[in-house]
Amino acid sequence: MNSMTDDDTRLYLPFDFKPHHSQNTELLGSTLWLKKMQLIEDGSFAEAVVHTASQYIRLIHPCIDNKFINVVFDLASWILVIDDIIENSASANTTDSTIELLSTIKFICEFDHEQNPSLDDQHPAIKSFIDIRQRFMKQLPRKNHMHLMNALSNQMSGFIWEICSNQTKSSISLNTYCAIRSSSFGAQICYSLFLALNSIPINRMIEAKNEFVKMKNCIFLAVGIDNDLYSYEKEHTDDSRAFNIIDVIQQALNIDLYSSIRKTINLRNMLINRYTILNSSLSSETEIRCRAVHLEELLARNIHFGKTSERYRKPPEGATEGDNYFFSASYRFNTTNAFEKKEIKEILELAPLISSLWHDPATNPASQLD
């Protein structure tokens, strides 16, 4: 099997990062909560979910306060279960019930004036989420709690769109994909948790500042692309349609897989380059800098998780031990700015959302990348 990364295309990672896993043994968790909530019956599968959630939390939040350990760990396990429910819904012919489930969870996220809305909470995923929500409500300031619930609600919207897009079997707009990937998937949840776990209050004026919104969107989309890179093999292990930017770019531009991977990486690197420029322009603003550092940690820690997690490092059928079977096996990084404008020119034409991170459409031409 040939490597998909034989050229010199590398992942741009300009932030200092040394993996630091929490040594707190409580983070190792157990399957007790999953079994109590009847989320998983199979013991070995429960242990695999617990292991992955534990690895992620220990890496992404190494200095987490003891009082948050259990609820954050359970949230991570719960999201993995939901992700597997979605991945299996098409083959199990349960897409309608899965959409109903996600819609109910989305409603619970947004129903903030009662601790326990009057819903049918007998479904294990709903019952367990209400449990998580109530515990966060007791532990977090109201604004942080609402910020986290909003991020989770957005992720449910993204999941629903993913399922509906898979059902239609039509081509996916690259612009729409990038918009939803940056606003409705896991990076927002991680950022919200960073704020809550580090006792950073929600400041609407700072969060809505134009330059900082662009900074967040650059990192959120870059993290989403990293997820697509390191989960590619896992998502393509059967005949089901994968929801991955590599496939979207390949179909939109009618190019081969290797060309699509190269363009995907260049797009990712360009987003991080833009983030660093915006961040430099706001370096004197302390409130923004204390938030930006968490965005940088999220990007670096997330990609390290993708590199080391057994959930994503399983080789495809037929691969041998010596095969370099994609990014999950062998990341290559570059600490200097590295993207080729020619590789992303067509992408920018198809995705004005990305171009908007550089300029105001009313005053600057779309071709500018300064």
Image: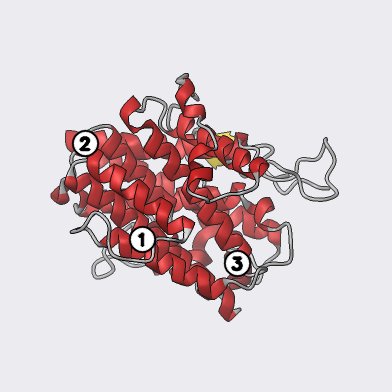
- The answer to whether residue 13 of the structure is visible from this angle is no
Using the image, tell me which numbered label, if any, was put on residue 154: 1
In percent of width and height, residue 12 lies at 51, 40
Q: How far apart in space, not on screen, are marks 1 and 3 (Cα)?
A: 20 Å
- Name the residue rendered at 18%, 41% in the picture: 141
Numbered marks: total: 3
When the figure is inspected, residue 101 is found, relative to residue 314, above or below; the finding is below
**Which residue has dot 2 on it?**
200
Q: The residue under label 3 is which amino acid type?
A: Ser
Q: Could you tell whether 39 is left or right of 75 in the image?
A: right
In percent of width and height, residue 170 lies at 58, 80
Q: How far apart in space, not on screen, are marks 1 and 2 (Cα)?
A: 21 Å
Q: Residues within 10 Å of mark 1 (few under 14, many from 20)?
A: many
Q: Secondary structure at mark 3?
A: helix
- Name the residue rendered at 38%, 38% in the picture: 71
Q: Residues within 10 Å of mark 2 (few under 14, many from 20)?
A: some
Q: The residue under label 1 is which amino acid type?
A: Asn
In percent of width and height, residue 217 lies at 35, 53
Q: Secondary structure at mark 2?
A: loop
Q: Secondary structure at mark 1?
A: helix
- Name the residue rendered at 47%, 19% in the picture: 23
The image's colour scheme reads secondary structure
When the figure is inspected, residue 244 is found, relative to residue 24, above or below; the finding is below
In percent of width and height, residue 5 lies at 70, 45
Using the image, tell me which numbered label, if any, was put on residue 89: 3
Which one is in front, 216 or 319? Answer: 319
Q: How far apart in space, not on screen, are marks 2 and 3 (Cα)?
A: 38 Å
Q: Are marks 2 and 3 in contact (CB under 8 Å)?
A: no
